[in-house]
Amino acid sequence: MVARALTEDGWTVSVERGPYDLIAFRGNDHVGLLIAAVHNGSWALLRGGFADALLRALALERQGHVGVPIAIVTAPRISPAMIARLAAYRDRFAPSISWGAVAADGHVALRGRIAREARPPRSRRGATPRQVNLFGDVGQRVLKALALDALGLPGGAPATDRTAAEFARELGISRSFAWAVLDELRRLRVLDDHDRADAPALLALWCRRYQSTQTTPWRWSRAGDPTSRARALARSGEAALAGRSAAAEHLGGRAPGVPELAVRSHEVALAAGLVPCAPGEAADAHVHLAPEAVLRSTMPADDHAALLDPVQCWLDLIDVSHADADALWRRVFRLA
């Protein structure tokens, strides 16, 4: 694919038996290509391969070898954000070396003696780059997996040194969407050089855009202890303890007062025997109408009642109970 990219720009390319992987001619220009191929477009792998190619190029430049040495890194896919990081890396460590980044999907950037501005992937159908909503249902599923992993909590999924396909498969989402979310988070500097999430930065970004789940007061239509019935519903797989109720359990206790429950739909609450409170009626439960992304990462309490995970509790409480949110931040997330 490197030869094809150069041929498209008018270069004649041939295999080199000397120190270069390929040589190329165009008019009076003669360059030697040093190519590092990596198996995915994560920064850790791209940086390692690119550093190797740059070091080889620097050595040949100092030896005065025939031809201008060019460092090239290739991968199945290289995002614009990764190309920008490669450019900064070269500028810092090997500013005299011309370089290129070539992806199998057609994304090409050639700089220096082989200069060409970054060219987006070719599309057989003329598709435009995918716009990603980080804060939609599926986007929040990715944010949740990265945040829990960075905090060392159950339910997380790392993106470190994995392909977008592997990450997407674990989360049950499309590879293109996983790639788009990870690339946007790299652009926002929420992922570090190894694609591990910076937990405080991710949580700060998330809480600025997060829309709290809708909560309404309900009562049980039949007699019984409201707390016991709420916990029984949370053990059924149809609901989860939420808000202060879940936060208290993550902090090692149980919350007094009216329990809070998260459900996928009001039909779930109605089927369990809950009915909306009329004006002035005392509530037996505060019901959160929660999207799928919220309910996918529940954790079990001691009695096997499902709890919303600590990240979700923190997001729901940050605007309504600073004390509980701060306790989660310090004691569960272990962040200063």
Image (spheres, grey):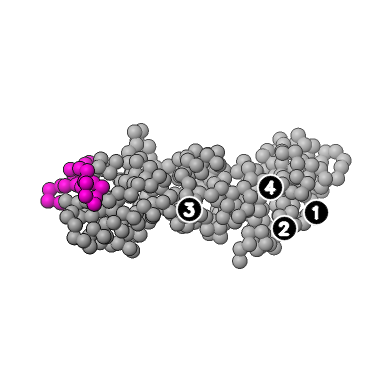
Q: Residue most toward the left?
A: 28
Q: CA distance from mark 3 to mark 2?
A: 29 Å
Front in this rendered view, residue 96 or 14: 14
- Give the Cα separation between the discs numbered 1 and 2: 16 Å
Q: CA distance from mark 3 to mark 4?
A: 25 Å
Q: Amino acid at mark 1?
A: Gly
Q: Examine the rendered structure and indicate whether residue 328 appears above or below residue 213.
A: below
State which mark lies toward you, 3 or 2: 3
Marks 3/2 in contact by CB < 8 Å: the verdict is no
Give the spatial CA distance, label 2 vs label 4: 13 Å
Q: Which residue is mark 1?
A: 257
Name which of mark 2 and mark 4 comes first in the sequence.
2
Residue at the image point whose x is 71% and y is 55% from the top: 250
The residue positioned 55% from the left and 41% from the top of the image is 170
For the residue pair 18 and 265, the one nearer the viewer reads as 18
Q: Which quadrant of the structure image shows residue 152?
A: bottom right
Q: Earlier in the sequence, mark 1 or mark 2?
A: 2
Q: Is residue 253 above or below residue 127?
A: below
- Badge 2 marks a residue whose secondary structure is loop
Front-most of residues 61 and 317: 61
State the residue position of label 3.
195
Residue with the mark numbered 2? 251
| First in sequence: mark 3 vs mark 2 | 3
In the picture, the quarter occupied by the C terminus is bottom right
* Number of residues whose C-alpha sits closer than 10 Å to that of mark 4, classed few (under 14), some (14–19) or many (20 or more): some
